[in-house]
Structure formats: structure tokens, C-alpha cells
Image: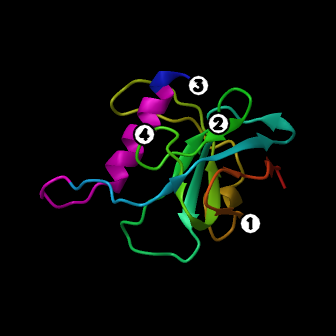
Amino acid sequence: MKKSLWVCVLGTLLMFSSGCGGGKKQDAPTVSLHPVTGKVSFDGKAAPGAVVTLHPAQGGAANAVTPFGIADETGQFQVSTYAPADGAPEGRYKVTVSWADVKNPGASDPEYGPEKLPRKYLSPSTSGLEVEVKPGSTEVPPLVLTRR
């Protein structure tokens, strides 16, 4: 995957995850993370650049972490929480997937093209996708997305 796309997505996620207060930067919690990998496809083809996000199934605090991964050219992804490919905390997650082209990768305020996936995949309550992260490595079953 192109480094500029990774930087854009990571920057955007950090922007949304940061609080509104002007307080001191908080260190990442000391939570055990476990490697999580998988593959995403849409209508039988790899979905390069698709963002796979894990949302705690139990809901949780507004500042709960949402691990994510970005699919490479083959649709493979590795989940990141605090650093690239560091994994995710143990637990059950609902999964969302978003896939849009970045029109100006590397820009401080990137523009995105239209969403390529049906709306149902954008919400944890409608995607129908779930995963359980267990101690050790977790291989997510293939995320086979379809137009229907």
C-alpha cells in the first residue's frame, strides 16, 4: 500500500479520535494487543484501499479505541490500534468497511471520491460483519462483500 494513503487515513483517524480538551497528551493505555489479519473483497475482486474498522460489540465509552486496517492491492489487511500493524485488544467487534478513492493523497485535507460499497457496510449495526479477537494471532475470515 502506498505510504501516502496510510498517512492520510491514520491522520484522519487520529484527528477524529483526539478529544476536544486542550489538556496534556495521554499515553496509550497498557492494553495487550493481538495481531489481526484478513482479506476483503467486493463482488469477487480485491478491494485495495478499503478501510476495515473494528467497533467494540458491547458499545463502550465515547473514547473507546476502534482498531482498523487498510487493504493492500490484494485485499489483505493488518489491523492497527496505536501503531501500524500492532493488532487489537481482545474482544468481540462489529466490523465496518468503507472504500473510496483518495483524490489528493498526501494532502493535509484529503478529498475522497464516492463510496464504492453499499451503505449497509458503513454501519456496525447493519454490516452483518463480526470478529472475535483472541489472545495470539487472529485471522479474520474473508470479508466477502457484495452489491446486494
Residue 71 image label: 2
Region rendered in magenta: 5-25
Disc 4 from disc 1: Cα separation: 25 Å
Q: Please report contact status of discs 4 and 2: CB closer than 8 Å, yes or no.
A: no
Q: Please report contact status of discs 4 and 1: CB closer than 8 Å, yes or no.
A: no
Residue 103 image label: none
Q: Which residue is mark 3?
A: 1
Q: In terms of secondary structure, what is the magenta stretch mainly?
A: helix
Whichever of callouts 2 and 3 sits on the residue coming sooner in the sequence is 3
Tell me, yes or no, whether the highlighted magenta stretch contains residue 127.
Answer: no
Disc 1 from disc 2: Cα separation: 19 Å
What's under tag 2, amino acid-wise? Ala
What's under tag 4, amino acid-wise? Leu
Residue at the image position 35 percent from the left and 55 percent from the top: 17
Q: Which residue is mark 4?
A: 10
Q: Helix, strand or loop at disc 1?
A: loop
Q: Give how far across and how far down residue 90 sits, in percent.
A: 56, 64
Residue at the image position 49 percent from the left and 28 percent from the top: 5
